[in-house]
Image: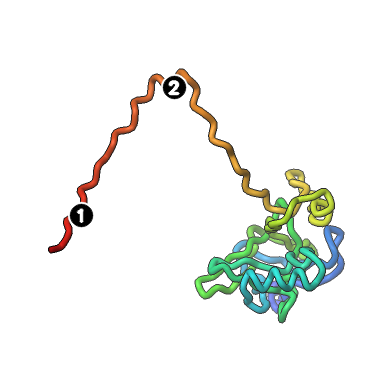
Amino acid sequence: MSDATLQQDLPAYRVERSSVHGNGVFAQRDIAPGERIVEYAGREITWDEAQVRAEEQGGPHNHTFFFSLANGNVIDGGDHGNEARFINHSCEPNCEAIEEEDGRIFIYALHDIKRDEELSYSYPLIYEGRHTPAIKRAFACRCGAPNCTGTMLAPKPRKRKPRPAPASLVDSVPAAAVVQSPQPVAAG
């Protein structure tokens, strides 16, 4: 058997300690761009149930195992999950997570990944509470990428106050036209 054939027979990944954070997932063999590596498995639950589980476990730190779905539910990788839950975040990822039409999540390689390279994807975490210094420290990004944002937290949506238009524009913009709709005719 050739080395290429033997390498393709190896599982694509393995879990071991990571210098980024806790456990990580590493390429067991070379992985080609676009290759489907692993499914993100776990029990599908509602967002409300995810919040209850987080509270029962003492805080938001297990949110890193929650994967939001397009239908509003969450996959809890900590409940019947697999090794994919150990893939660490990176601001310069080599993988991406794609939700398929059936609601399953798969991790795909963005580019060539060499054997022993740590797998990563970008997953800005949604934390609805205040982003206090303690929370920011708890969710600090340690990916080491040159463009690292320093946090795994998704930015909170900003509430912008409407600003008045400059006086020079107010005078030059015509007033909006009033559009009248015909009134419905009562059946009678």
Total labels drawn: 2
Q: Tell us which disc is closer to us: 2 or 1.
A: 1
Q: Can residue 10 be seen in this view?
A: no
From the viewer's perspective, is 100 left or right of 8?
left
From the viewer's perspective, is 167 left or right of 113?
left
Within-10-Å neighbours for mark 1: few <14, some 14–19, many 20+ = few
- The numbered dot on residue 184 is 1
Asked if 66 appears above or below 138 in the picture, the reply is below
Q: Residue at x 80, y 54 (%)?
A: 135
Q: Which residue lies furthest to the front in this view?
A: 188
Q: Give the quarter of the figure containing the N terminus.
A: bottom right
Q: How far apart are marks 2 and 1 (CA)?
A: 38 Å
Q: Which residue is drawn at 63% across and 77% down?
A: 44
- Depth order, front residue of 128/31: 128
Q: Earlier in the sequence, mark 2 or mark 1?
A: 2
Residue 24 image offset from top left, x and y in percent: 80, 66
- The numbered dot on residue 169 is 2
Q: Can residue 81 be seen in this view?
A: yes
Asked if 84 appears above or below 145 in the picture, the reply is below
